[in-house]
Image (spheres, grey):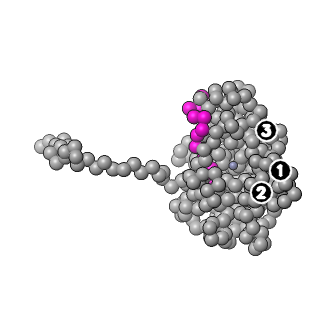
Amino acid sequence: MKPLFIRSVALALTLTTASTWANAPKQHFQAPGFYRLALGDFEVTALNDGTLDLAPKQLLTNVSQALVSEKLEQAFLDDEYPASVNAYLINTGEKLVLIDTGTGSSGIFSPALGMVISNLKSAGYAPEQVDEIYFTHLHPDHVGGLITDTGMAFPNAIIRADKREIDYWTSDEMASEAFAGHRPFFEFAKTSLASYLENGRVKPFQGETILLPGIKSVPATGHTHGHTTYSITSEDKELLIWGDVTHVGAVQFSHPEVTIVFDTDSTQAAKARESVFAEVAKQHTLVAAAHQPFPGLGFLREAGNGYEFVAFPYGGE
Ligand SMILES: [Zn+2]
């Protein structure tokens, strides 16, 4: 008897003519964007908000165009490429904590964003289950997911961010003094926070603070005045969720001095980046980066005068 495979092929050939191929349309969409990781007793779920087209030559500062071109080329990236926007969900066993919320349904940067809630649902959770939300900072791609077209996206959550961050982005005076390109961010942050402020759900903290057992805020000021990283520890494992310590990894890992037009204080942002890089490389700390390719998890190691990012192995724990 002929092997089954050969018989199947023979049958298919007799039944098929060129005009009967399926001509299936391309599907374009990806698998749901969540990635699960055990961290000691905690469960961490990376949630993808989608992607945002970044054009580093137009956005990066304190760097030559030639160096940006060279670094993008080395990373096989075009002048404009889709950069991930990532948020992270921590289940401590007692509390469900979301760090950053993505862009929401505003479409402010791109229609290819705003998927945090659908990915959170795909990951097995409901927005109503989120107890606390911690912000790395209040730029639109981090705070926009707080609201939907009908109101609060997370009706039971309390909101925590550094006091300097909340004071700055909700201040009309600061908005009037800000660089014109940053002004729309003030209105966006205020609109996103409004219903939570009205309901007494916003609880600022000041600098380094233990927010829950195993979760600590660690300031990394510069990208914004209250930009904050979060150290998550359980048993002997640690993860540093670092928000926008980097935007363009292809350039900034090897050249941490390179800044971006979105920085409120770019000199300070570069200093913060250098000190975070040095610390996580020395301690071999796992990091979660908002704009590294999803799920944005990896390690840093020294390379030449700078660093390189080593992506966390898929399926690793
Ligand atoms: Zn960002």
Q: Give the x, y percent position of residue 107.
A: 61, 56
Q: Does the residue at mark 1 contact the one at mark 2 (Cβ under 8 Å)?
A: yes
Checking the image for residue 270, the label placed there is 3
To which residue does mark 1 refer?
178
Residue 97 lies in the magenta stretch: no
The mark closer to the camera, 2 or 3, is 2
Element type at mark 3: helix
Circle 2 Cα neighbour tier, 10 Å, few/some/many (<14 / 14–19 / ≥20): many
Q: Could one spot residue 255 in this view of the protein?
A: yes
Quarter of the picture containing the N terminus is top left
Q: CA distance from mark 1 to mark 3?
A: 20 Å
- Front residue of 176/162: it is 176
Q: Does the residue at mark 1 contact the one at mark 3 (Cβ under 8 Å)?
A: no
Element type at mark 2: helix
Residue 79 lies in the magenta stretch: yes
Residue drawn where x is 66% and y is 48% of the image: 290
Checking the image for residue 13, the label placed there is none
Q: Give the x, y percent position of residue 287.
A: 67, 45
Circle 1 Cα neighbour tier, 10 Å, few/some/many (<14 / 14–19 / ≥20): few
Residue 198 shown left or right of residue 74 in the figure: right
Residue drawn where x is 57% and y is 34% of the image: 78
| Residue range corresponding to the magenta coloring | 74-87
Element type at mark 1: loop
Q: Could one spot residue 236 in this view of the protein?
A: no
Q: Amino acid at mark 2?
A: Phe
Residue drawn where x is 75% and y is 67% of the image: 194
- Earlier-in-chain disc, 1 versus 3: 1
Number of numbered discs visible in the structure rendering: 3
Quadrant position of residue 54: top right
Q: Amino acid at mark 3?
A: Ala
To which residue does mark 2 refer?
186
Q: Amino acid at mark 1?
A: Ala
